[in-house]
Amino acid sequence: MEHPGSRDLMDFISPAQWEKIGIPYSDKLSWERWGLFGVLADYVLRYIYGDIIEVGVCETSIYISFLAKKYNRKTYHNDIQPAVIENCQTVPGYFLPDAVLVKDSSDNFFKNTTFTSIALAFIDGDHTYEQVKKDFENVMPLMVPNGHIFLHDTLPLSDEYLPPHKCGDVYRFRQELDGRKDLDVFTFNHSAWSVGLTMVRVKPIGEPHYRQ
């Protein structure tokens, strides 16, 4: 039996219309939630070959599954809450049939899963500096050159967003990434619920000076 909440979300986002326009962008939600992520992720996968990792299953899984089908990529989804994945599994299209679904901590997800090369990663699991840093460091060795990592909750709107059940202190890791020379980092302050969507490009090694 389908989980009603997962079905309602799938229908509200309207992925059926994406087949017509070719990119995952909700006409109902516009830029307010994950439209920007959908457009940017489509851009990344169009030009960069590799598969997809998602830490923290939710609305973004719909976008990721659409893109994985469009570009014939493999997906790896992780959430520490089994019910989140199980509810979404009841709705066709939420995940692809060959998706790897891991109901465990992200530490165990990275430790116990054999991954292919990754072009796109999305990190939105535990909202603490320590854990998001570990998730990022675990995904980095899997990334292809020019692969992109997206992080959520990196630019809280106010002090009210700092508790762990909201944005936590993920912003501290975003501030740390801003100083890295091996990465291109940019944070969008709108979209993604307006609490920060940080896009990270892994720079290739050995490029000519004019491409560095």
Image: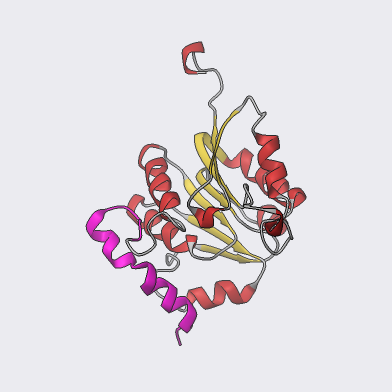
Q: Is residue 152 magenta?
A: no
Quadrant position of the N terminus in the picture: bottom left
Q: Quadrant of residue 95?
A: bottom left
Query: Is 151 displayed left or right of 23 in the figure?
Result: right
Give the residue at x 77% y 49%: 130
Residue 13: image location, x then y, percent: 38, 67
- Name, please, the residue furthest toward the right: 130
Give the residue at x 58% y 73%: 84
Residue 187: image location, x then y, percent: 55, 40
Main secondary structure along the magenta-highlighted residues? helix
Residue 145 vs 198, above or below: the answer is: above
Range of residues picked out in magenta: 1-26
Give the residue at x 46% y 54%: 74
Q: Is residue 20 magenta?
A: yes
Residue 197 vs 160, above or below: the answer is: above
**Foreground: 205 or 100?**
205
Q: Quadrant of residue 113?
A: bottom right
Query: Is 85 displayed left or right of 93 in the figure?
Result: right
**Foreground: 89 or 17?**
17
Residue 184: image location, x then y, percent: 55, 30
Query: Is 138 displayed left or right of 68 in the figure?
Result: right
